[in-house]
Amino acid sequence: MPTIKIDNQDYDLDQLSDEAKAQLASLRVTDAEIQRLQAQLAIARTARNAYSRALLQALPSPVEQAQKSETLKFS
């Protein structure tokens, strides 16, 4: 007799109505999808951080920027 606890109440899965079983199945699928999306979001955030670091490395340093500005000045 498998059971499930919902709001601190135990329910016998075999005694649930077909509608309740269908809702439970949908809830489980939804929970799995949320976990999958959270994993994808973590991957996207990790990639974004890597791209941000790479961009900072590709940008000229403030010293390089100042030197370029000085060489472009015309009198």
Image (cartoon, rainbow, N blue to C red):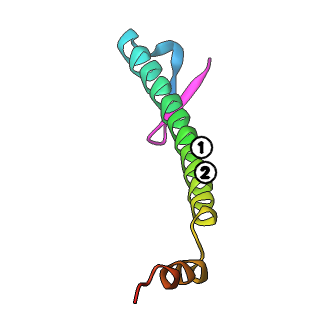
How far is disc 1 from disc 2 in space, using C-alphas?
A: 5 Å
Which residue type does callout 1 highlight? Answer: Ile
Could you tell me which quadrant the C terminus lies in? bottom left
- Three-letter code for the amino acid on which mark 2 is drawn: Thr
Residue at (60% x, 83% y) in the render: 63
Residue 22 lies left or right of residue 68; in this view the side is left
Question: Counting other residues with Cα less than 10 Å from the Cα at mark 2, is it few (<14), some (14-19), or many (20 or more)?
Answer: few
Q: Is residue 61 magenta?
A: no
Q: Which mark is residue 15?
A: none
Using the image, determine if residue 42 lies above or below residue 32.
Answer: below
**Residue 60 against residue 16 in the figure, above or below:** below
Q: Is residue 15 above or below residue 27?
A: above
Contact, mark 1 vs mark 2 (Cβ under 8 Å):
yes
Image quarter of residue 67: bottom right
Viewer-proximal residue among 11 and 50: 50
Query: To which residue does mark 2 refer?
Result: 46
Residue bounds of the magenta highlight: 1-10
Which numbered marker is on residue 43? 1
Let me know if residue 8 is in the magenta part: yes
Mark 1 crowd level (few <14, some 14–19, many ≥20, 10 Å Cα)? few
Residue name at image x 58 percent, y 71 percent: 60
